[in-house]
Structure formats: structure tokens, C-alpha cells
Image (cartoon, grey):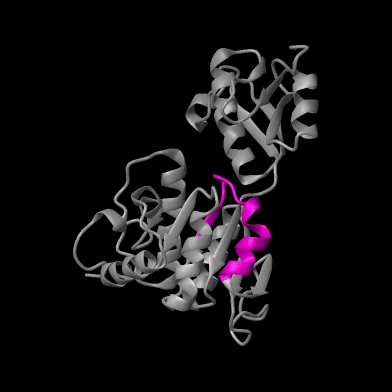
Amino acid sequence: MSTAIYPELSGALRDEEPVALVTVIEGPGIGGKLLVRPDREPIGSLGHDELDRVAHRDALAELEAGRSGVRHYGPAGETTPEDLIDTPIVRVFVESWAPPPQMWIFGAVDFTAALVKVAKVLGYRVTVCDAREVFATRRRFPMADEVRVTWPTPMFDERGGELSARDAVCILTHDPKFDVPAVQGALATTVGYIGVMGSRTTHDRRIERLAEAGVTDEHDLDRLMSPVGLDIGARTPEETAVSICAEIIARRTGRVTPSLRDGEGPIHQ
């Protein structure tokens, strides 16, 4: 075991930076450890290069979601059931130290409840925000971690600094009094995903309103995913929520996917 693991782990915890420790708890190489941090080479080994590679990949995924748990592999990193037949099983415990990624949803509309559900499955801490007290209620969004009755600007002024590349802002309202300041607030952060609901015509009008508000930088506007979601033919709120979350995953992992933003014509056939 590398003697650098524990000082590195201690430093990450002290600096409140995301870090995961993978430990073999059963099978060949028991006791082996691998320290995993985003954008850095892992430290240590579980006993095989390919096992290290696969465990490193999976630990980053667990860390992204802020989860800890047990994973099963073969001694050489095998993962599929047919490859594990007659092979000793290596059980590893992935212990993550990271807050869950955040999703802020602006607009207490019908699509919001569905998006909250899907986001919670993916491990997000979800906040719903709407200035209309009658709509922004716990009763309507019981799965949300937080429901706030406020306008976007105070929300971003108070907590925008919390958002990072792991997080997402989804703006589901079509009210310019709400969505323009929400977009402005999101653009002022380092949040990794900004999705804005609406048709192509609606988004064109939104761009005009943003220009009137002083938002004209092409780099900033390119951060907006609108129409929001992958082009999978989604129609219901639940299908739309899946398309939005799938787009978030694709953007985070750098995959080239058919986003509605990059297409032409109506978003619903």
C-alpha cells in the first residue's frame, strides 16, 4: 500500500475536496487500497492494473453522485457475469467523501415534479424555486430536498457560489420576469449545466430579452441548453425529465448526443 494515501486523503478532507477510497474487503488482494480524486492520477493499487482501471472509473462515478457502496469484480477487473464464472470474486468498498451534486429547478410547474423524481434517482440534492407561494409547496414536491419561495436573483446572490461543474440549473418557466434573471444568475456561476425549457421560437424571444438585459456574450449563450433535453421524442413530463437528465449526463461525460438545441424544426412531431 502506498504510504502517500493517508496524507493525501487527510489533505483532501481538510480542504473539503471530493475524494474516494477504494478498499478490497474480500477476495484476492484483501486490504488493497486505491485513492481516487477527480482530474488526478489514482494512488495505490488493488493488485492488478485492469482492476485498478475499472475500480478507478467506477469510484469516480460514485464520487460524482456522492455515494458509497460495495462493488464486485474479478481479480483482473472482470465485470460481466459470464466473465465471473469460476473466478474468485473481489469485493471492494468505495467510500466517498463529497456532497451530492445539486440541481436547482426554477418554476413550480407540472414538469418539475417529474424532474425532481428522476434527479433524485441519480443522486442529486434538488431545490425547487418559485416566487409563487401557492405553487411552491412541499405538498406538490414531496421528493425535493428543499422548496423555496423566492425570485431567482436573491437565490443566486445568497447561494450561487455553491454551484460547481457537478451541478445543474434547470429553468422550466416561460415567464420572462422569472426566466431572464434565472438565466443571468446561472451564467454568473460555474454550474456545469444550464437547461432552459421552451420551443425554438420561445428561446429566440428569450435571447432577445437577454440581449436587452445586457447578456450578449456568445460564450455565455452557448452554455444554455434550449430547447432542453436530448432529442428522444419525449412528450410526457416523465419522458421529458428523462431526456433532460440524459442530456446532463452526456454533457458531463463529453459524449456527442442528439440534443434538441442542435436540431431544427419543431421539437414535437
Residue 156 shows up from this direction: yes
The reply to whether the magenta stretch includes residue 164 is: yes
Query: Residue 87, percent across and down?
Result: 58, 20
Depth check: 51 or 116 in front? 116
Q: Is residue 22 above or below residue 29?
A: below
Residue under the point 50% across and 48% down: 192
Quarter holding residue 9: top right
Query: Residue 29, percent across and down?
Result: 71, 15
Residue 45 shows up from this direction: no
Q: Main secondary structure of the magenta part?
A: helix
Query: Residue 208, percent across and down?
Result: 31, 68
Query: Residue 175, percent across and down?
Result: 44, 78
Depth check: 212 or 36 in front? 212
Quarter holding residue 18: top right
- The number of numbered badges drawn on the structure is 0
Quarter holding residue 119: bottom right
Left or right of 174? Residue 40 is: right
The reply to whether the magenta stretch includes residue 144 is: no
Q: Is residue 102 above or below residue 86?
A: below
Depth check: 152 or 73 in front? 152
Quarter of the image that includes the N terminus: top right
Q: Is residue 220 above or below residue 34?
A: below
Q: Is residue 92 above or below residue 111?
A: above
Residue under the point 63% across and 75% down: 150
Most extreme residue toward the bottom is 134
Depth check: 177 or 37 in front? 177
Residue under the point 46% across and 47% down: 249
Residue under the point 53% across and 24% down: 78
Left or right of 140? Residue 213 is: left
> What are the residue bounds of the magenta stretch?
152-169
